Image (cartoon, rainbow, N blue to C red):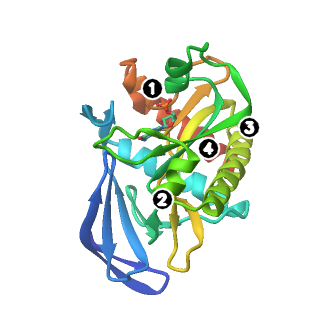
Amino acid sequence: MTENTVEFGGQQLTRGDLLYEGKAKQVFATNDPSIIWMHYMDQVTALNGKVKEEYSGKGELNSSISNLLFTYLSNQGLQHHWLGSISATDELVKKVDIIPLEVVTRNYTAGHFVSRFGVEPMQQLSPRVQELYYKSDELDDPFMNDSQAVSLHFASEADLKTVYGLADQVNELLVALFNKIDITLIDYKLEFGRLADGQIILADELSPDNMRLVDQKTGKSLDKDVFRQKQGDLRVGYQDVLQRLQDALK
Ligand code: 5GP
């Protein structure tokens, strides 16, 4: 691989235009219209980008964790956009039209669920909670209910049923995996997209940037809450998560 080209699945792929820059990732076109090139950045943000810092190596940690989790999900039969890793910080994914909804699953109370409803943190939620947010930086990702999402034509009722079903499959698989490595999966955000033929699949990334993970033995956060709450270097927890996943999945 040179910086901008890579041999993948028997074809030469070249990185093209920057399509989108998020808070922690850059998304590029390639010469194959069905394939997207994603680059994980070292930047970390909180409060929807209002607080920003660089942590060298963070992109690599997130890319490695995400790659392991997507590989685990495919081994369990779940379809998603991830195709393969091409460097420590870059990966190829299937081109999808992202549905502009953030799908949050909560297994325990934390974060906005605690501030919104005045409940104690770390209470198990049974059944798990599923929430939708409208993906909009300008509007700070407002909460959105199903009928709003359907009425605004972001997704049909059938699409939402698919999305919630996939989110539940992901939840079952991830909770089981994290439990094996003594980590509680508190909550997390997923995104979904549509392939050219309309099929809805899991997209985006799976990393401690968009999950809350708590060490079952120490009660310590191993995710972006360490940065949000100014508790130190978030890379320590991310490295710990990566190491445990590598050991469990090898
Ligand atoms: P909360 O609603 O409590 O802030 O977040 C719930 C979960 O979803 C947390 O694990 C959080 O990391 C994730 N999450 C919610 N919104 C976003 C977002 O816009 N970006 C990222 N990276 N994660 C999010």
Query: Tags 1 and 3 in contact by the CB under 8 Å rule?
Result: no
Q: CA distance from mark 2 to mark 1?
A: 30 Å
Q: What amino acid does circle 4 point to? A: Leu
Residue at figure coordinates x 70%, y 43% from the top left: 177
Q: Is residue 30 above or below residue 231?
A: below
Query: Tags 2 and 4 in contact by the CB under 8 Å rule?
Result: no
Number of numbered markers: 4
Q: Is residue 221 above or below residue 209?
A: above
Q: Is residue 102 above or below residue 31?
A: above
Which label was assigned to residue 225? 1
Q: Which one is earlier in the sequence, the residue at label 4 or at label 1? A: 1
Mark 1 or mark 3, which is nearer to you?
A: 1
Q: Which one is earlier in the sequence, the residue at label 2 or at label 1? A: 2
Is any part of residue 1 visible from this angle? no
Q: Which one is earlier in the sequence, the residue at label 3 or at label 2? A: 2
Provide the secondary structure element on which disc 2 rests: loop
Mark 3 or mark 2, which is nearer to you?
A: 2
Provide the secondary structure element on which disc 3 rests: helix
Q: What amino acid does circle 1 point to? A: Asp
CB of residue at label 1: within 8 Å of ligand 1? yes
Q: x, y (%) of residue 118?
A: 56, 14
Q: What amino acid does circle 2 point to? A: Phe
Q: x, y (%) of residue 92?
A: 43, 68
Q: Which residue is mark 3?
A: 180
Q: Which one is earlier in the sequence, the residue at label 4 or at label 3? A: 3
Q: CA distance from mark 4 to mark 1?
A: 20 Å
Residue at figure coordinates x 74%, y 41% from the top left: 176
Which label was assigned to residue 154? 2
Q: CA distance from mark 2 to mark 4?
A: 35 Å
Badge 1 crowding class, 10 Å Cα cut-off, few under 14, some 14 to 19, many 20 or more, is many
